[in-house]
Image: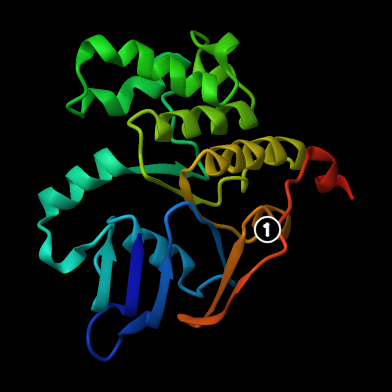
Amino acid sequence: MLVVHDLVKDYGEDGQRVQALAGVSFKVAKGELVAIMGPSGSGKSTLLHILSFLDRPTGGSYSFSGRAMDSLSDQELARIRNREMGFVFQAFNLLSRSTVYENVELPLLYSDAPSIRRKGMVEQAVHAVGLDDKMFSEAGKLSGGQKQRVAIARALVCGPNIIFADEPTGNLDSQSGAVVMETLEKLNRAGCTVILVTHETYTAEFARRLIRLKDGRIESDEATKARRKTKADFFK
């Protein structure tokens, strides 16, 4: 699904250039749940931004579902992001005075989904994260864990092939973080590819594969002994 070869990303001008990625190569198959870890400044967020078409590399190549990134215009990248990718961020990025329904519906307003189908699509996404009883509650009045589950529902509503999650449990307590990761794991078992960036070991342990970055390079890339975890695992 994703093919990354010798990916390089530089920032700054000559003489003050910083290399965030220094030749990264790997592949991700459809249906994988991959965690990317590394210390601050290792390049993990930069990599996620390129994978999710939010930034372009300086060098190397990246193909998503057989389409080379460097052959696509900004408009084409935006179209793929809207139709095929879902995003979950550490800060939730919800409209606090809008309802759960309105927040989840938002991506549909910028899509070509028929208006007659939108209500069902929103309800299905909210049901998938277990928040049916909060459908018309204001997002700002929810707990942190509930807000992140709304963000996951919003990421799901357009039916993406892949979800990118940037520190999805970073602003949550352990119990709420466990519920969020159980939700992402459930979606992955249903066939959705998930790639997440995290600095938290317990969060990464939900993944079936762990890529570690250091100084813009892959330090290790290996399968994990992941098992289905529960909230209790976060308190051991």
Q: Residue furthest bottom?
A: 15
Q: Is residue 211 above or below residue 161?
A: below
Q: Is residue 48 above or below residue 19?
A: above
Q: Residue 220 at x, y = what percent?
A: 58, 80
The residue tagged with tag 1: helix, strand or loop?
loop
Screen quadrant of the N terminus: bottom left
Name the kind of residue labelled 1 in the image: Glu
Type of colouring:
rainbow
Q: Quadrant of residue 159?
A: top left
Q: Residue 56 at x, y = what percent?
A: 24, 66
- Towards the viewer: 224 or 132: 224
Label 1 belongs to which residue? 200
Q: Is residue 148 left or right of residue 100?
A: right
Q: Residue 25 at x, y = what percent?
A: 39, 79
- Residue at image x 18%, y 52%? 77
Q: Is residue 212 left or right of residue 233?
A: left
- Residue at image x 55%, y 52%? 167
Residue 103 visible within the image: yes
- Towards the viewer: 78 or 142: 78
Q: Quadrant of residue 230?
A: top right
